Amino acid sequence: MRLFECGSLVPGCDWHTRADSDAEVVRRAVEHLRQSHGETLIRENMVDNIKARIVEETKAA
Ligand SMILES: [Zn+2]
């Protein structure tokens, strides 16, 4: 499972999402950034910033 925590990109935000694929995580994260952080124009490097912060969720957690 792939996990993205918005707080790693937007300090103080506790929103997070998990999905089977990076593509789905990115899609949800972009949607969240638009709705919650006013990112109406997603910059080119935004997707890279999200991808760089996606982590593999450990099953032991
Ligand atoms: Zn957020």
Image (tube, rainbow, N blue to C red):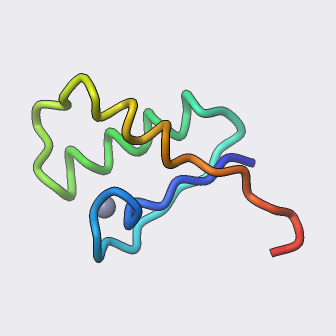
**Quadrant observed for ligand 1 in the rendered image:** bottom left
Q: Where's residue 18, x and y in %?
A: 61, 52
The vertical placement of 27 against 3, above or below, is: above
Residue at 28% x, 62% y: name it. 10
Q: Where's residue 59, x and y in %?
A: 87, 64
Instruction: Give the quarter of the image for residue 30.
Output: top left
- Please state if 28 lies on the left or on the right of 60 as rendered: left
Q: How many numbered callouts?
A: 0
Residue at 40% x, 45% y: name it. 29
Residue at 74% x, 58% y: name it. 57
Pick the front one: 42 or 53: 53
- Please state if 18 lies on the left or on the right of 60 as rendered: left
Quadrant housing the C terminus: bottom right
Q: Where's residue 28, x and y in %?
A: 43, 42
Q: Where's residue 35, x and y in %?
A: 21, 50
Pick the front one: 7 or 32: 7
The vertical placement of 47 against 13, above or below, is: above
- Seen as rendered, the residue at the extreme right is 60
- Please state if 42 lies on the left or on the right of 48 as rendered: left
Instruction: Give the quarter of the image for residue 24.
Output: top right
The vertical placement of 42 against 57, above or below, is: above
Residue at 41% x, 67% y: name it. 15
The vertical placement of 23 against 39, above or below, is: above
